[in-house]
Image (tube, rainbow, N blue to C red):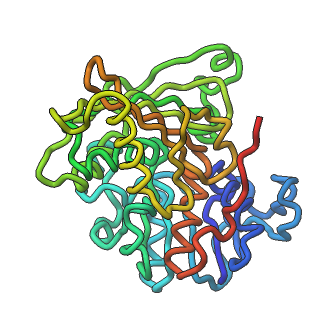
């Protein structure tokens, strides 16, 4: 299977190249990048020297699937020609995640370049849309924050044990801001500091709300989402809260056991979602495609608490994209994604 990456020079793009370099069923044949076009990939990223590729301004080879790691709007514009040619596309930008075009344009501040593809795009949260992903042409790879939040809350929402009012408190490493230069990502600004941002609404908020609403179509979820920047390179830890419905779980150890069993049953057989016996840390998912969940209850307030951990560049971006590709092409789901976390 022949693969291309649009914008290999961003963090998601280079992570895709790292994973695909050892994928047993994929051959990376073309990578693009604007500023670095004409250079060997190994000149820009020496750790990818095994990939004897030149960064091109446009894809020049015939391919079976294209991964786009371009920014929003630019990604949809670049993907459209491939879609018209019948090539499968996995878009890591936000361009095809939201089904409501007006909502997309409100949150992203641009006119959608090809809204005609929104309906056919499959939201690429593999664990929830596996059937739809099989054989589809266009995948909207989820955002990193929504992946952590939706996976944390999905079992409770789907089983109807919580009220539709949610708080998602997330902390992310600096790589989530991308590879472009910005004052807020400078070492001296980030080091030894934690800061909240987007208090008036983060672009991932409507994505979280959209997917929770699909899980419980008779209830309209209300979501408070607050992201934080923390001084590390990669990783997301989300603390997710919701009030339990009266009588949803028995109090005490029996209720805690039932909650854990609910989560274990919901994700039974999923290769990349782990329900942990102890609260996870971001180091437990660094460099791999796992999302580790720890569900618990504060019985004093009858409130569900779920801790969710993942690597924002792998399960939150490139790894999930490759997982989606594996499902689309009926390949072994874990192909290319079997690495364990880098710990400590």
- Left or right placement of residue 230 versus residue 100 in this view: right
* Residue 254 sits in quarter: top left
User: What residue appears at the point 46 percent right and 85 percent down from the top-left corner?
Assistant: 86
Q: Is residue 205 above or below residue 263?
A: above
Residue 6 position in % (x across, y down): 61, 64
**Residue reaching furthest to the top:** 192
Residue 32, visible in the rendered structure: yes
User: What residue appears at the point 74 percent right and 59 percent down from the top-left corner?
Assistant: 18
Judge by depth and name the residue closer to the eye, 204 or 31: 204
User: What residue appears at the point 56 percent right and 66 percent down from the top-left corner?
Assistant: 323
Residue 255 position in % (x across, y down): 32, 35
Judge by depth and name the residue closer to the eye, 190 or 215: 215
User: What residue appears at the point 47 percent right and 55 percent down from the top-left corner?
Assistant: 93
Residue 230 position in % (x across, y down): 59, 24
Q: Is residue 120 above or below residue 190?
A: below
- Left or right placement of residue 148 versus residue 304 in this view: right
Residue 109, visible in the rendered structure: no
- Left or right placement of residue 115 versus residue 140 in this view: left
**Residue reaching furthest to the front:** 254
């Amino acid at each position: 299977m022949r693969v291309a990456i649009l914008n290999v020079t961003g963090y998601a793009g280079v992570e895709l190249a790292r994973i695909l370099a050892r994928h047993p069923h994929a051959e990376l044949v073309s990578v693009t990048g604007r500023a670095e076009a004409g250079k060997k990939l190994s000149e820009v990223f020496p750790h990818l020297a095994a990939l004897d590729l030149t960064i091109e301004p446009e894809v020049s080879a015939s391919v079976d699937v294209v991964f786009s790691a371009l920014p929003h709007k630019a990604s949809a514009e670049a993907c459209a020609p491939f879609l018209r040619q019948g090539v499968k596309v996995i878009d890591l930008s936000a361009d095809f995640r939201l089904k409501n075009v007006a909502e997309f344009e409100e949150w992203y501040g641009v006119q959608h370049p090809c809204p005609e593809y929104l309906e056919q795009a499959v939201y690429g949260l593999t664990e929830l849309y596996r059937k739809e992903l099989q054989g589809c042409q266009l995948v909207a790879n989820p955002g990193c924050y929504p992946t952590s939040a939706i996976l944390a809350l999905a079992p409770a929402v789907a089983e109807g044990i919580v009220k539709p009012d949610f708080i998602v408190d997330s902390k992310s490493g600096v790589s989530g801001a991308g590879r472009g230069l910005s004052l807020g990502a400078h070492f001296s600004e980030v080091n030894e500091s934690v800061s909240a941002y987007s208090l008036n609404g983060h672009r991932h908020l409507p994505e979280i709300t959209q997917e929770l609403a699909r899980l419980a179509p008779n209830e309209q979820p209300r979501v408070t989402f607050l992201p934080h920047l923390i001084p590390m390179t990669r990783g997301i830890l989300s603390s997710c809260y919701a009030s339990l419905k009266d009588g949803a779980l028995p109090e005490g150890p029996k209720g805690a056991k039932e909650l854990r069993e609910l989560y274990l049953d919901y994700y039974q057989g999923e290769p990349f979602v782990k329900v942990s016996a102890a609260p996870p840390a971001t180091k437990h998912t660094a460099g791999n495609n796992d999302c580790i969940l720890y569900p618990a209850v504060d019985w004093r307030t009858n409130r569900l608490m779920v801790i969710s951990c993942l690597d924002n560049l792998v399960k939150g971006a490139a790894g999930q994209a490759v997982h989606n590709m594996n499902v689309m092409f009926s390949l072994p789901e874990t192909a290319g994604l079997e690495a364990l976390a880098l710990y400590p």
